[in-house]
Image: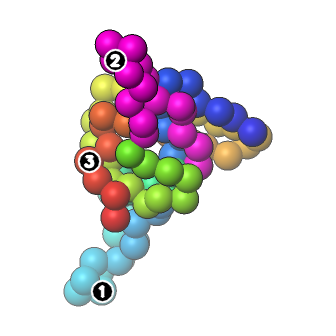
Amino acid sequence: MFKPLHNYVLLQRIEEENKTAGGIIIPDNAKEKPSRGRVVAVGDGIYDDGQKIPMSVKKDDVVLFAKWASSANEVKIDGIDYVLIKESDILGIL
């Protein structure tokens, strides 16, 4: 299995509903990439002034992340699409 380094987090996107609250079906070409994901793996954290800063998220957390995060990298591992992102681009845990 893939183990991220430092303060990186490996996420698997959680697909959003393809219908609006009113029941209108959204076609695939009009959908935005989901900004929610399930944490698959986390790095060990980073060191600052010799002190280790632990990660705030853990495996299986569902998180909300910035849609246009500068650190986001799309990766494919064993045929599955993932997002590799810095912990600082995660907005919160759901």
Q: Earlier in the sequence, mark 2 or mark 3?
A: 2
Q: Position of residue 10 (x, y in %)?
A: 54, 40
The quarter of the rendered structure image containing the C terminus is: bottom left
Q: Earlier in the sequence, mark 2 or mark 1?
A: 1
In this rendering, would 77 be left or right of 24?
A: right
Q: Which residue is mark 2?
A: 48
Spatial CA span between label 1 and label 3: 29 Å
Q: Secondary structure at mark 2?
A: strand
The residue positioned 54% from the left and 59% from the top of the image is 60
Q: Which residue is mark 3?
A: 91
- Say whether residue 46 is magenta: yes
Q: Residue furthest front?
A: 50
- Foreground of the two, 13 or 21: 13
Q: Quadrant of residue 93?
A: bottom left
- Say whether residue 59 is magenta: no
Spatial CA span between label 2 and label 1: 50 Å
Q: Is residue 48 visible?
A: yes
Q: Secondary structure at mark 3?
A: strand
Q: Which residues are magenta?
A: 40-55
